[in-house]
Image (cartoon, rainbow, N blue to C red):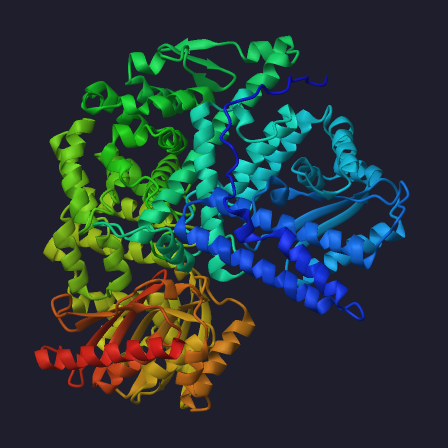
């Protein structure tokens, strides 16, 4: 049955931005006069001077609009309206010129009529500088030759001006038929505006559109637009908080606002967004929020188009910096200008999400009131009451508009109940919560019941992620926990983190809950096993909430966050032991990943130092799980099996040390056990271990895993007396490819192999360098592709082997070819990555640990290893970590005599060489 909804009443209107001094943008009369004079002075018709005149008018208009945007950098509506006005005038000039000078027709028949429509965003009167010019030519019946000639001539002029034109040419019947069939065409015509030509024909087209296309299809249009929106969100990452958002198509962006307007217009025939208020779909304050968000996004989009000179809608890192400068954002203590700009951006996107919820809820109510509901639907919607809240139709709502105002603690309770009952928060309740969140003051924040409700939600055994996200959308999260409120919509300006701090945190809590429920056993088996063993389960949830809570305050966020935890935890109801544990976890939440990814886990001193900080099994278990969920919530592809293996290795080594203390097996005993395990893998009665084992240094047996040693010994057997042997194999346990190169040891060998692997498209994530007692270099590398995946195809393996062979035979010039290779992170230049070299002579009993932080470049590892060779050091192992645009490369080195490098002058000279190597990669890349 068709639903009839009355047209909207007029609502409070914010008038469309008045375009001041229009003639400064384009003076149509003056341009027409010049054009007519040009034509009159021609002996024969010539398009070129006409195009030149029109191009001059276009360029002058664009320059004027750009100047105005510089003066008012946040005036998005004004800039978009001015751009639309400029194109309007040019289209009208061109039309009149064509029908007057190119294809004049004295007596037109009824079929020789033409209406020109502005459609899509252009029809709405909102254009960014490089937006497409979407126009429609409408004729009353089958196109006459004159209509086709006029339309074609106009299009050629527009194309000659360099404009991107989206166009259609249809009869009235075609328009109706195609609009019924195609949602995109229907939406474009919904926005149609009379531009020029035959006004009566346009009026007829509009009347037929509403009567023959729209009438009776309201419900279907809404369903189709929401399905289209959901598919678009999925394509764009399905989050409002991705750090390089698409201003137009992304979730919470312009297109979401347009969708609301389209739906309102289709159902209620509103003519402007302000009429959504009269239609009962938005309140007056919500409409103002709609306009503010739209104005901001339009301004950002206009700046992006002006900066790039093209239709660019993705707010990439390099554009973020430029747009923030143009919009006059400045640095503040703890936050850079670009971070403040992006925080404002995400707050607007968050607001768009809230508006969408209340808009659709009101629309749903309007449909429901007018629909005939059967007995089954009425039974399904039967209300039940819990603690004063009403639950019906799978949603929890408030019984009156003043329900929260009578007791602000209910603002927390509604989300806790929604999670417990497994229902959604009704958009009407979300609207009231958004409005009343300001009622949560210090007295509410210090109320034990309010905090108990919040802690119940946070540590719920039913995954609290969705309810926490609703709480955040409504602004309640940041009010009950103002410490969290400071990181809401806060961007982390780097290429490592994919989400804002609040979104990252909520995702981490959701991951933790899924691990606890057993859903992620395949991905995180160790964490799934350990979580039930925790004594202080809710402390882990609070630590997950607070691990990044001090970002943007200036200083070390781990230390500042630990101080905050000591104040917040008692307020939430945690006891002294839990508070101490949460503060410790927040302070050390980066310790485990830094140790696992940047240190040699085969070096016993690494484990000793780590355990000295951790001290107990409870802390070790808690820290492992917190590290896992933190990494997993950074973004897609950040977690991989290599990181899982390293963290597991560190966990088990630390567990052994904590349980056995100084009773841990000594070096000789560990080597003996390792050899026994290798023999078991080889199943040859110990022949290969006996044959080659004596040549291997003790450090080799300690450093390498049993399966790698077994593989190395088999390779030595096959190698015989050949000068070079290269083996590649997919190493599933590590999520990487194991590349082993064996050759007579010689200076620069490691450096050349590194360069060859990178040139073949591989990223080295770990390297262990050994030299046997008889002078054979045995170098094991773990390699992935630039996206963190192993090389598994035969062709990829062969490319690695060929690359290393050619490099060691001096058949390729590594340095220039590496320098020419583009970085996988194409926008890394947007970040200020200052190179640093750190030395640590305490981290290992035998080696000097050298850590180099620099911008990630394809040639970086090759140049660093070359610099270490030239500085007369011996590299024992290398551990390569990437954090987006930044590389952190760690080397365990000695001098040529096998001693640590302790001399201050020697360390300074080594630092100078390494920094010069980094600088060389930067110069080559630029």
Residue 446 point in image, percent of width and height: 18, 23
Residue 195 point in image, percent of width and height: 69, 43
Instruction: Give above or below for 400 relative to 577.
Output: above
Instruction: Give above or below for 301 relative to 706.
Output: above
Residue 311 seen in the figure: no
How many badges with numbers are in the image? Answer: 0
Instruction: Give above or below for 260 relative to 152.
Output: above
Residue 448 seen in the figure: yes
Q: Quadrant of residue 565?
A: top left
Residue at 55 percent across and 73 percent down: it is: 795
Q: Is residue 160 left or right of residue 838?
A: right
Quarter of the figure with the C terminus: bottom left
Instruction: Give above or below for 411 relative to 142.
Output: above
Residue 607 point in image, percent of width and height: 18, 59
Q: Is residue 912 left or right of residue 758?
A: left
Q: Observer-nearest residue: 697 or 68?
A: 68
Q: Is residue 137 left or right of residue 721?
A: right
Q: Observer-nearest residue: 126 or 482?
A: 126
Q: Observer-nearest residue: 850 or 602?
A: 850
Q: Observer-nearest residue: 815 or 677?
A: 815
Quarter of the figure with the N terminus: top right
Residue 260 point in image, percent of width and height: 56, 32
Residue at 54 percent across and 59 percent down: it is: 60
């Amino acid at each position: 049955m068709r639903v009839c909804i009355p047209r909207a009443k007029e609502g409070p209107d914010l008038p469309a931005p008045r375009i001041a001094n229009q003639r400064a943008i384009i003076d149509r009369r003056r341009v027409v006069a010049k054009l007519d004079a040009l034509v009159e002075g021609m002996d024969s018709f010539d398009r070129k001077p006409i195009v030149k005149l029109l191009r001059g008018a276009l360029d002058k208009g664009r320059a004027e609009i750009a100047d105005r945007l510089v003066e008012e950098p946040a005036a998005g509506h004004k800039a978009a309206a001015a751009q639309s006005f400029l194109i309007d005038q040019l289209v009208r000039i061109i039309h009149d010129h064509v029908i007057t000078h190119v294809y004049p027709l004295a007596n037109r028949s009824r079929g020789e009529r033409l209406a020109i429509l502005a459609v899509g965003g252009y029809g709405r009167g909102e254009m960014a500088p490089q937006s497409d010019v979407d126009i429609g030519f409408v004729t009353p019946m089958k196109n006459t030759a004159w209509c086709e000639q006029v339309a074609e001539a106009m299009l050629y002029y527009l194309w000659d001006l360099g404009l991107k034109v989206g166009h259609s040419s249809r009869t009235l019947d075609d328009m109706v038929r195609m609009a019924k069939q195609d949602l995109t065409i229907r939406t474009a015509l919904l926005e149609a505006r009379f531009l020029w030509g035959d006004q009566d024909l346009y009026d007829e087209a509009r009347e037929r559109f509403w009567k023959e296309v729209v009438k009776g299809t309201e419900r279907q249009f809404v369903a189709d637009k929401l399905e289209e929106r959901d598919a678009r969100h999925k394509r764009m990452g399905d989050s409002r908080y991705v750090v390089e958002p698409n201003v137009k198509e992304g979730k919470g962006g312009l297109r979401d606002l347009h969708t609301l307007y389209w739906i309102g217009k289709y159902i209620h025939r509103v003519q402007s967004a302000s009429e959504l208020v009269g239609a009962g779909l938005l309140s007056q304050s919500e409409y103002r929020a709609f306009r503010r968000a739209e104005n901001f996004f339009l301004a950002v989009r206009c700046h992006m188009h002006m900066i790039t000179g093209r239709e660019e809608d993705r707010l990439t890192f390099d554009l973020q910096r430029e747009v923030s400068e143009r919009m006059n954002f400045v640095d503040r203590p703890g936050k850079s200008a670009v971070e403040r700009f992006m925080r404002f951006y995400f707050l607007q996107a968050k607001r768009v999400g809230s508006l969408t919820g209340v808009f659709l809820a009101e629309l749903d109510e309007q449909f429901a009131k007018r629909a005939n509901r059967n007995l089954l639907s009425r039974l399904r919607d039967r209300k039940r009451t819990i603690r004063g809240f009403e639950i019906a139709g799978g949603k929890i709502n408030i019984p009156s508009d003043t329900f929260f105002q009578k007791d602000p603690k209910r603002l927390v309770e509604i989300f806790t109940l929604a999670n417990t009952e497994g229902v959604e928060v009704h958009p009407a309740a979300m609207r009231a919560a958004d409005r009343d969140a300001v009622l949560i003051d210090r007295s509410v924040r210090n109320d034990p019941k309010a905090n108990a409700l919040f802690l119940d939600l946070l540590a719920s055994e039913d995954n609290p992620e969705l309810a926490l996200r609703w709480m955040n959308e409504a602004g309640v999260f940041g009010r009950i926990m103002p410490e969290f409120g400071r990181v809401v919509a806060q961007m982390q300006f780097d290429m490592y983190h994919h989400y804002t701090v609040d979104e990252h945190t909520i995702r981490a809590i959701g991951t933790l809950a899924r691990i606890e429920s057993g859903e992620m056993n395949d991905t995180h088996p160790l964490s799934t096993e350990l979580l039930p063993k925790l004594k202080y389960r809710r402390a882990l949830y609070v630590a997950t909430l607070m691990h990044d809570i001090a970002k943007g305050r200036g200083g070390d966020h781990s230390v500042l966050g630990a101080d905050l935890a000591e104040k917040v935890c008692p307020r939430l109801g945690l006891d002294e032991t839990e508070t101490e544990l949460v503060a410790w976890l927040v302070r050390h939440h980066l310790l485990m990943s830094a140790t696992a990814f940047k240190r040699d886990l085969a070096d016993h001193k690494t484990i000793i130092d780590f355990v000295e900080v951790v001290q107990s099994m409870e802390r070790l278990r808690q820290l492992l799980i917190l590290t896992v969920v933190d990494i997993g919530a950074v973004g897609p592809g950040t977690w991989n099996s290599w990181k899982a293996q390293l963290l597991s290795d560190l966990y088990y080594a630390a567990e052994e040390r904590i349980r056995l203390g100084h009773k841990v097996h000594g070096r000789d005993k560990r080597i003996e056990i390792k050899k026994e395990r290798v023999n078991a893998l080889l199943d040859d009665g110990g022949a290969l271990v006996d044959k080659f084992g004596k040549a291997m240094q003790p450090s080799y047996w300690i450093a390498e895993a049993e399966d790698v040693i077994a593989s190395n010994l088999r390779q030595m057997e096959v190698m015989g007396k050949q000068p070079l042997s290269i083996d590649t194999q997919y190493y599933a346990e590590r999520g990487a490819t194991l590349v082993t190169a064996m050759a007579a040891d010689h200076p620069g060998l490691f450096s050349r192999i590194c360069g060859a692997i990178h040139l073949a498209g591989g990223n080295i994530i770990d390297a262990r360098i050994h030299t046997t007692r008889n002078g054979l270099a045995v170098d094991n590398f773990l390699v992935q592709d630039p996206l963190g995946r192993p090389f598994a195809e035969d062709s990829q393996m062969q490319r690695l082997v060929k690359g290393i062979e050619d490099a060691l035979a001096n058949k390729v010039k590594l340095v220039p070819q590496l320098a020419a290779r583009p970085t996988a992170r194409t926008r890394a230049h947007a970040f200020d990555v200052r190179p640093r070299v750190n030395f640590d002579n305490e981290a290992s009993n035998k080696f000097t640990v050298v850590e180099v932080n620099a911008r990630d470049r394809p040639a970086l590892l090759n140049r660093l290893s070359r610099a270490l060779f030239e500085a007369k050091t011996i590299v024992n192992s290398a551990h390569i970590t990437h954090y987006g645009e930044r590389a952190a490369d760690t080397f365990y080195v000695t001098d040529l005599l096998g001693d640590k490098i302790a001399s201050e002058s020697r360390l300074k000279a080594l630092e100078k060489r390494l920094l010069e190597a980094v600088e060389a990669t930067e110069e080559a890349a630029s």
